[in-house]
Image (cartoon, grey):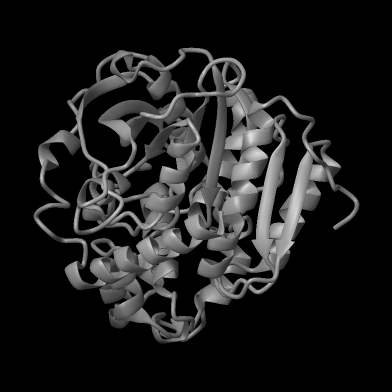
């Protein structure tokens, strides 16, 4: 296992380096843009219905020497946005070459990617095809264990419109509907009503947690055996305050673009000065490494017309109510959950993640909350791999889910 983690770290770092050099705008990453254009109007159907699909690639390395152990199909499927309006979302369905040796039918994991960026070239399906997806090692680890995996691109990544970054409802819908789509894709040869799980870290941890909360009402037919949610940005106000002046302050720009798109009545550019408006427009075409390089250590007080930091606005209307809508922890997941968070996370504050887990406990959810002391947000992700793999294995093996509510 340690060898796999070391290989995963090396692959992730090489992918990140390649991403920085290529700025994710390579012709390879944008090889088939026409696939990402949805038909207009959308065909009639239900959430999770396949709109179109095609064969695709998934390379674990940027040199494209290592193919992931799976057959791969790119999909476009129906989902719903923040306001329950129908939208088209793309993603990737992965059917492993490994046999499923566990009990029952082969499970499907709905994988929620971490922060990719907001520009269309940042879509995980494009990154996977180009060998630039930094979460490739974890996804490959799931495939090697016999799980089928479906990876959503979320709303607006590749497809028209702005990506609704860390938007609770839109991301939760996209994850749940991706699982439905994988079940309904005949070419994937997966069970149409078998066991499923949800997994993700960082932005993906928030999407996984949101999907777990929405599952009972939005997709109750899915047989969710458990949800792993790592480093969840459960309280965007707390995360925004932490990111101000941070090396990852570009992520705050992603959130501004997302909120303005989902809630245009906020008219966020109106509070920005010329420098702020420039950043606001620039991040819409940036991926993770680009945004870090371009905006590191920027103070948001230098971006606003009145010189106040952006966090100051979050306690005022109309922003306060809209940010409150993104809070994760106010709804009860009915499936068991594993929440992992490093106490030394430098991007997503530990305490707000712990508060989310405590809120779930108070609502009667089975929660295993695991605190690591591995430094940094990235380090916490790598350290969580073995625990997440083991916990998911136990859920599909039918073992009782651990619960440490009241003990953390």
Q: Is residue 241 left or right of residue 7?
A: right
Residue toward you, 114 or 21: 21
Q: What residue appears at the point 33 percent right and 33 percent down from the top-left corner?
A: 70
Q: What residue appears at the point 38 percent right and 60 percent down from the top-left corner?
A: 267
* The C terminus lies in quadrant: bottom right
Q: What residue appears at the point 64 percent right and 71 percent down from the top-left corner?
A: 374
Query: Percent position (x, y) of residue 217?
Result: 62, 24
Query: Percent position (x, y) of residue 157?
Result: 29, 47
Residue toward you, 46 or 281: 46
Relative height, residue 199 to residue 84 (above, below):
below
Query: Percent position (x, y) of residue 241?
Result: 58, 74
Residue 222 appears anywhere in the view: yes
Residue toward you, 34 or 10: 10
* Residue that lies at the very extreme toward the right in this rendered image: 406
Q: For residue 14, which quarter of the picture?
A: bottom left
Q: How many marks?
A: 0
Q: For residue 400, which quarter of the picture?
A: top right
Query: Percent position (x, y) of residue 148?
Result: 44, 29
Q: For residue 225, which quarter of the picture?
A: top right
Residue toward you, 240 or 19: 19
Residue 282 appears anywhere in the view: no
Relative height, residue 266 to residue 147 (above, below):
below
């Amino acid at each position: 296992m340690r060898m796999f983690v070391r290989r995963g770290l090396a692959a992730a770092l090489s992918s990140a380096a390649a991403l920085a050099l290529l700025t994710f705008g390579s012709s390879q990453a944008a090889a088939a843009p026409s696939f990402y254009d949805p038909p207009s109007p959308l065909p009639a159907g239900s959430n999770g219905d396949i709109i179109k699909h095609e064969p695709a690639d998934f390379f674990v390395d940027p040199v494209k020497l290592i193919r992931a152990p799976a057959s791969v199909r790119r999909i476009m499927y129906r989902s719903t946005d923040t306001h329950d309006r129908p939208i088209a979302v793309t993603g990737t369905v992965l059917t492993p070459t490994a046999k499923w040796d566990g009990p029952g039918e082969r499970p499907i994991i709905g994988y929620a990617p971490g922060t990719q960026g907001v520009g269309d070239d940042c879509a995980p399906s494009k990154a996977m095809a180009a060998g630039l997806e930094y979460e490739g090692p974890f996804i490959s680890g799931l495939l090697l264990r016999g799980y089928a995996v479906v990876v959503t691109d979320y709303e607006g990544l590749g497809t028209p419109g702005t990506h609704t970054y860390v938007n609770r409802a839109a991301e939760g819908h996209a994850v749940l509907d991706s699982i439905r789509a994988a079940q309904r894709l005949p070419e994937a040869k997966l069970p149409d009503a078998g066991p499923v799980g949800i997994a993700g870290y960082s932005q993906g941890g928030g999407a996984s947690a949101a999907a777990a909360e929405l599952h009972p009402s939005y997709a109750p037919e899915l047989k969710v055996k458990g949800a792993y949610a790592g480093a969840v940005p459960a309280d965007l106000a707390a995360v925004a305050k932490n990111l101000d002046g941070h090396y990852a302050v570009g992520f705050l720009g992603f959130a501004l673009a997302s909120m303005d798109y989902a809630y245009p009545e906020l008219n966020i550019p109106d509070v920005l000065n010329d420098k702020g408006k420039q950043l606001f427009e620039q991040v819409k075409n940036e991926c993770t490494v680009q945004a870090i390089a371009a905006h590191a250590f920027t103070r948001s007080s230098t971006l606003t017309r009145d010189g106040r930091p952006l966090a100051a606005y979050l306690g005022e209307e109309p922003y306060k109510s809209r940010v409150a809508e993104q809070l994760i922890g106010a709804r009860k997941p009915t499936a068991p959950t594993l929440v992992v968070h490093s106490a030394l996370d430098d991007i997503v504050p530990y305490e707000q993640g712990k508060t989310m887990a405590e809120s779930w406990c108070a609502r009667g959810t089975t929660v295993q909350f695991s605190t690591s002391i591995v430094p940094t947000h990235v380090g916490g992700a790598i350290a969580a791999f073995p625990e997440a793999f083991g916990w998911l294995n136990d859920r599909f093996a039918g073992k009782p889910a651990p619960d440490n509510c009241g003990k953390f």
